[in-house]
Amino acid sequence: MPEHRDYDYNEEARNYDATRGGDARATAAANAVHELLPAGSRILDIGGGTGLVANFLLKLGHEVTVIDSSAEMIRMCEARGTVPAVHADATSLPFPSSSIDNAIMIWLLHIVEDPAPFIAEMARVLKPGGRFVTTVDKLQSSKPGHTRARTDAPELISRLCQEAGLAEQAPSSFVGYGQQGEPVYQLAVFERI
């Protein structure tokens, strides 16, 4: 299973939502994603953690399934009792090729060592015409001048998505309400060719 940088998300699960902007940040993310996808979309939330963003997407009329590699994050998501949750590695998704309508990765790619296998696997399961929405430059949004390698740099994610057969669409953004400084998060949007 690919390693995530900085945190043990099994340890973080219980306090994750409260320490990351809670409902306010999750609602802002869900509203931004909602504007980028067709009404009532079926969405795979890859790295969806506790399911907080997915829960708000559900309230906006979407059908959402959460995938996460952290057993504790999945347990927290299941405890909400609102959206299906699957404990799985995002680089080996338990879905057939071209079977997923839309996919999102919100606040995921900045914590992985190499985003390429995550993008390739998401592209494998995404249907032609399906959309992929992801946050990019997360650390630059919340901590300007951060020097750690940017595994979610927009130009890198754009190149990887293009190599995987996705066409870039107009980007978007949203404010991280509920967080100190209310950072503006950037969203990259792609469509499966």
Image (tube, rainbow, N blue to C red):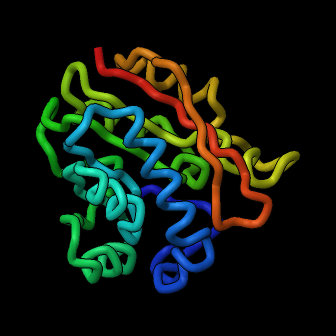
In the displayed structure, 105 sits above or below 176; it is: above
In the displayed structure, 69 sits above or below 154; it is: below
Which quarter of the image is occupied by the N terminus? bottom left
Query: Residue drawn at (70%, 41%), measured in percent from left and top?
Result: 150
Q: Quadrant of residue 185?
A: top right
Image location (x, y in percent) of residue 169: 46, 18
Query: Residue drawn at (34%, 47%), measured in percent from left and top?
Result: 91
Image location (x, y in percent) of residue 42: 20, 43
What count of labels does the image hold? Answer: 0
Image location (x, y in percent) of residue 107: 54, 53
Image location (x, y in percent) of residue 145: 88, 46
Q: Quadrant of residue 123?
A: top left
Q: Quadrant of residue 111?
A: bottom right
In the displayed structure, 60 sits above or below 190; it is: below
Query: Residue drawn at (79%, 59%), measured in percent from left and top?
Result: 181
Is residue 39 left or right of 138 when viewed as pictured?
left
Q: Nearer the viewer, residue 137 or 29?
A: 29
Which quarter of the image is occupied by the C terminus? top left
Q: Nearer the viewer, residue 60 or 147?
A: 60
Is residue 40 left or right of 115 when viewed as pictured?
left
Is residue 41 left or right of 37 when viewed as pictured?
left
Q: Nearer the viewer, residue 75 or 83?
A: 83
Is residue 27 left or right of 153 when viewed as pictured?
left
Query: Residue drawn at (27%, 32%), measured in percent from left and top?
Result: 38
